[in-house]
Image: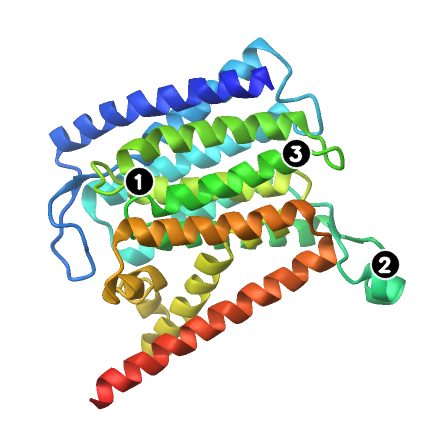
Amino acid sequence: MILLISWGLLAFFLSFLLTLLVRRLALTAGIVDKPTVPRKIHSRPVARLGGLAIYISVSAVVIGILVTSNALTSGEITSWHYIGVLIGGLILMIGGYLDDRYDLPAHTTIFAPILAALVAIGFGIEVDKLTNPFSAIGGYAFGGGGFIYLTSLQSDFLVFVWLMLVMYTTKFLDGLDGLATSVTSVGAIMILLLSLTAAYFQPDVALLSAVTIGAYLGFLFWNVHPASIFLGEGGSTFVGFMLGTLAVISGGKVATALLVLGIPLMDVVWVISRRWREGGIARVFIGDKKHLHHRLLALGWGQTRIVILYVAVAAAFGVSALFLQSREKLVALIILSLLMILTALFFVQKERHAHSS
């Protein structure tokens, strides 16, 4: 526990100080987010590139631990895995910098996340089996008992889809001050707690989670409303990349991450499907103000209130994952899906009423 706290605090203070440095560099270089389009909700230019502080903090502390001890490699995670994660993160930082600096066309920003996910897979980030939520009610008729074993190709495909889904969830979630970092911090905390339980006990995963949480919170201090710096393109995908990777290397705690990210993830699916219907693939990459958090803003909610709501829901379902079995987690996911569907129907009806009047 002392190890977790000490390395986590180091990541926190590094991120805290580096965020100040990155903010100054971004402002000096003119890499700022200007409120020049209607979907922007801030009223003044704000520094971008904040994710760089998180990435450098995580990288520095992880490398420091690997050099000085075997605390991060005491289980099934190897140095090779960490190298893949750090290289994948570097790709996101480079792609994010280019977008933050030059405002690249929206459809080109997908290449960095794709490459980062492929690099992580190439360095061995994989899932060899999934818990079968139907085993207790169907045995082998529902997939082979307690686990569903995956081939290498199935694993690679699943991990790729998962990482892309989580990265784009946090990218789209990064629409309010502190929202994406707060929710992903909750996810990392839940994985840390699960990794310390007797049923799972993975001290290496817990340590990596502590480092990740520390780096997130050090940045979050400057990112809460009113934010003095934003995650930027690279940061908004990197926080999802780290959470998605943690869920995989911790032995497939994907259900836990799904419960934490349930509402924002389903919001992404809803928004993408709506944009696709409105204008095809080209429309998918064009931002708007129709995400759930934007709709709550339109109802008169403040940014801080919305962030607290998201964090509370994420924490509630995340804590439930600490006590629920696989089949019960599936039920929780279904309940979460129904809540999101009802919310979507509410806003659809509200829009129709507004148009008719």
Furthest-top residue in this view: 68
Q: Secondary structure at mark 1?
A: loop
Q: Is residue 259 visible?
A: yes
Mark 1 vs mark 3, foreground winner is 3
Answer with left or right where residue 257 lies relative to residue 297: right
Q: Secondary structure at mark 3?
A: helix
The crowding category of the residue bearing disc 1, from other C-alpha atoms within 10 Å (few below 14, some 14 to 19, many at least 20), is many
Q: Which residue is mark 2?
A: 144
Q: Which mark is residue 231?
A: 1
* Dots 1, 3 in contact, CB < 8 A: no
The chosen color scheme is rainbow
Question: Counting residues from the N terminus, which is met first, the one under dot 1 or under dot 2?
Answer: 2
Q: Is residue 257 visible?
A: no
Relative vertical location of residue 40 with respect to residue 335 in this rendering, above or below: above
Furthest-bottom residue in this view: 356
Q: Quadrant of the C terminus?
A: bottom left
Relative vertical location of residue 352 with respect to residue 332 in this rendering, above or below: below
What amino acid is at disc 2?
Gly
What amino acid is at disc 3?
Ser
Q: Quadrant of the N terminus?
A: top right
What amino acid is at disc 1?
Leu
Mark 3 vs mark 2, foreground winner is 3
Question: Counting residues from the N terminus, which is met first, the one under dot 1 or under dot 3?
Answer: 3
Relative vertical location of residue 8 with respect to residue 198 in this rendering, above or below: above
Q: Secondary structure at mark 2?
A: loop
Q: CA distance from mark 1 to mark 2?
A: 43 Å
The crowding category of the residue bearing disc 3, from other C-alpha atoms within 10 Å (few below 14, some 14 to 19, many at least 20), is many
Q: Which mark is residue 195?
A: 3
Q: CA distance from mark 1 to mark 3?
A: 27 Å
Answer with left or right where residue 102 lies relative to residue 165: left
